Amino acid sequence: MYQNKITLMPRDILEKEFKIDTRGYRLKEVDQFLDIVIGDYEQFFEIINNLEKEKADLLAEIMNLKQELRNSRLSAEVANSASGEVTNVDVIRRLSQLEKMVYGSKATDDATEEENKEDN
């Protein structure tokens, strides 16, 4: 994937031999080689930065998907518990019990009559 952007391999750098001139290595040859090495380093840093950005984006997406999954599971649990257990009769009975507590016996008699009418 990135191999076509990188010129030198580690072995190429290790085995590189420069020609010796009267005052040492040929400066032009060394400078050209170092330019290639610098170019490769720039490519490595660009590749690393791109991969780090991609990694951060993927981690953020994973976190969003995990949160979505948690919310979906919670919604499914709420839907399952609500749909299977609570009926209209249960709601009316609970309402009747609340009325008994709040209003006393008069509301109790009225609620019982209403409940009996709906059951029939």
Image (cartoon, grey):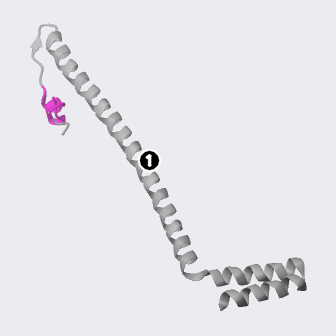
- Left of 61 or right of it: where is 10? left
Rendered position, 46 above or below 85: above
**Is residue 87 located in the magenta-colored stretch of the structure?**
no
Q: Residue 87, how many percent across, how many down?
A: 61, 81
Q: Is residue 33 visible?
A: yes
Identity of the residue drawn at 19% across and 22% down: 36
Q: Residue 91, how many percent across, how many down?
A: 68, 79
Which three-letter amino acid code belongs to the residue tagged 1? Ala
User: Is 110 or 87 nearer to us in this picture?
Assistant: 110
Identity of the residue drawn at 16% across and 34% down: 9
Q: Which quadrant holds the C terminus?
A: bottom right
Q: Residue 76, how many percent across, how many down?
A: 50, 70
Q: Residue 65, how many percent across, how many down?
A: 43, 55
**Hey, which quadrant is residue 23 in on the image?**
top left
Please tell me how crowded label 1 is: few (under 14), some (14-19), or many (20+) other residues with Cα within 10 Å.
few
For label 1, the residue is 60
**Hey, which quadrant is residue 86 in on the image?**
bottom right
Kind of element beneath mark 1: helix
State the count of labels. 1
Magenta residues (range): 4-16
Identity of the residue drawn at 21% across and 18% down: 35
- Left of 58 or right of it: where is 74? right
Q: Is residue 26 visible?
A: no
Identity of the residue drawn at 72% across and 87% down: 115
